[in-house]
Amino acid sequence: MEFIHSVLSQNLNVQAGGVWSWDLPVNPLSHIYVTFKFKQNKPDTSIGFWDILTNITKMEVLYKGSAIYSMSGWDAWACALLICNFEPWANNWNGDDDDELSMTWLIPLGRTLYEPRECFPRSTRGELILQITLPTTGVRIDTRRMQIETVELPEAAPEQFLRMTTLSVTPTVTGELDIELPIGNPISDVVCFGTTKPSGSVETPTLLYAQILVDNQRKFYSHVNYETWFNMAGRIHPPAGYWGLHVHRLDQAAYVQFNDTGYTIQRDSVFGWWNLLPFDIFKDGRYTLETAGKSDVVLRINAGVADAIRAIPCEIVAAGRGY
């Protein structure tokens, strides 16, 4: 077998507030790389990691107008790491004015990259479209260019593909709330986002705990608390490289940090806002959350804080079924 890694768009100049679309290849498609290139505009402080993620409002893959992938730039970064163990490496992050920086997002159409049994099936030209929406304003950015690269598997005969679309809810009160998960396809994972995470002396997060109910019966996750839920991600990935904050131990405070021989201590993780509920641990269907024929499949969240929650179920869609 072979794969074809090719460029769909080379350094396209894009403007804030625009919506950009590309026809995707017709061969079975494993994944898409979206690279955002820009020059830093530094009037005062350097651009931050979160500033970069907010420079993509929405990323979507549409098949005949229906989304098989749809989420924000923030969620796309988190999902790539949690589902595919993909963490991009930013380069040239020196923090000077006019520095040339880049950041790459992964859009997976299967949970394992390059997997011929799980990728998007062959399509007809114009049916499969990538669409990216940029925010109306950018943060500390002068120029914007976009590179789109795709990985096709021309000899693949996929049995299934991955669909990931976003469910959003903002509770008005704290306490339990139910998010209806899609019915019909097996669900391998659910990525959850909560606006508030523990910070400083504040203990209570938005995602206080989670449960899964199928036809009013608890399944898989009878009850999982935020703290354990968050740390469960250590099974698949070490703490993300872009730590929220860290501190340096200085042997002698009067000297610069380069004289330090102590440890770098992680103070925080950028993943405090996202938690992963995995079902299909081995990616072989052994533990998938089956939804076909069910009346009600629910993600129950106890909202410790009444603010925005997002859930992104990872559906495994049979290639022979309607998309």
Image: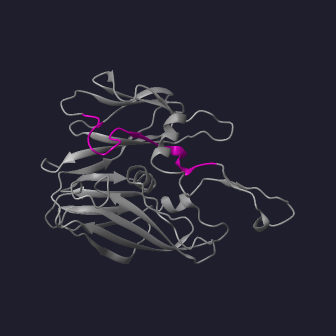
| 179 over 260 or under it: above or below | above
Residue 221 visible in the shown view: yes
| 233 over 74 or under it: above or below | above
Residue lying at 64% horizontally and 41% vertically, measured from the top left:
199
- Where residue 79 appears, as percent x and y from the top left, is 41, 51
Q: Which residues are magenta?
A: 268-290
**Is 169 in front, or is 185?**
185
Query: Which quadrant of the structure image shows residue 154?
Result: bottom left
Query: Which quadrant of the structure image shows residue 131?
Result: bottom left
Q: How is the image coloured?
A: one colour
Q: Main secondary structure of the magenta part?
A: loop
Residue lying at 77% horizontally and 65% vertically, measured from the top left:
257
Q: Dividing the image into 4 quarters, which one contains the N terminus?
A: bottom left
| 29 over 163 or under it: above or below | below
- Where residue 304 appears, as percent x and y from the top left, is 53, 30
The reply, left or right, for residue 163 in relation to residue 209 is left
**Is 234 in front, or is 317?**
234
Was residue 34 drawn as part of the magenta stretch in this picture? Answer: no
Query: Which quadrant of the structure image shows residue 36?
Result: bottom left
- Where residue 260 appears, as percent x and y from the top left, is 77, 63
